[in-house]
Image (tube, rainbow, N blue to C red):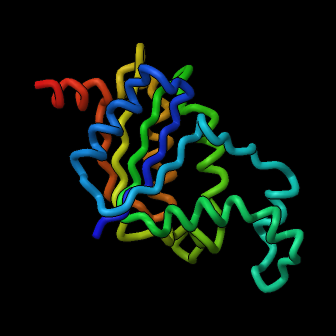
Amino acid sequence: MTTVLHINASGTRTGSISRAATARLLQDLSPTQVITRDLAETPLPQVDETWITTRLIPETDLTAQDQDVLALSDALIAELKQADIVLIGMPIYNFGMPAALKAWIDLITRPKVTFRYTEDGPLGLLTGKKAIVAVASGGVPVGAPLDFATPHLQQVLQFIGIDDIAVHTAKDVIAEAAA
């Protein structure tokens, strides 16, 4: 039984290369359950001062209002915890990831929830998961010095404990499917 968290970060809903690539990869995975998080369909808020300070309050001290502040973050983390595989379609916009994907990252990267600090440095708490990333770029080759998106996403995933990361060029995924 495999659960996939399928995240689409492209703001383009029609004709998106990253969406087409993740759809193909999802078909190849043939999971038993899919959790879909479309960041264009349901935009996420940017973190603000209230959220930033509330996330540091010990769980036992959270008020009902604090819990409301963290509710969306908790829901996103629950999706992530439920998944065996995280499938992310990520276009590169202006050398980086879309703001929508950065908002998701900010909301799921929480101390004592998805990572913790130890004497040896940070320790990711979401181990045993795999991430598959389909990167679409019209001008900056994936992995090129100006591709700031791919290494950033890989770093964040590793930070929260997801070390098994496969990165695919979206155009290659689509070309292989057509062959």
Q: Which residue occupies the foreground of this view, 155 or 91? A: 91
Residue at the (68%, 60%) spot, across then down: 73
Q: Position of residue 49 (x, y in %)?
A: 86, 52
Q: Position of residue 167 (x, y in %)?
A: 32, 41
Q: Is residue 125 left or right of residue 66?
A: left
Q: Is residue 87 above or below residue 169?
A: below
Residue at the (48%, 39%) spot, across then down: 8
Q: Is residue 116 left or right of residue 80?
A: right
Q: Position of residue 83 (x, y in %)?
A: 42, 64
Residue at the (28%, 70%) spot, across then down: 1
Q: Position of residue 63 (x, y in %)?
A: 88, 77
Q: Is residue 69 left or right of residue 79?
A: right
Dividing the picture into quadrants, the one containing residue 40 is top right
Residue extending farthest bottom: 60
Residue at the (83%, 78%) spot, across then down: 62
Query: Residue 163, can we see it?
Result: no
Quadrant assignment for the C terminus = top left
Q: Is residue 38 above or below residue 97?
A: below
Q: Is residue 42 left or right of residue 147?
A: right
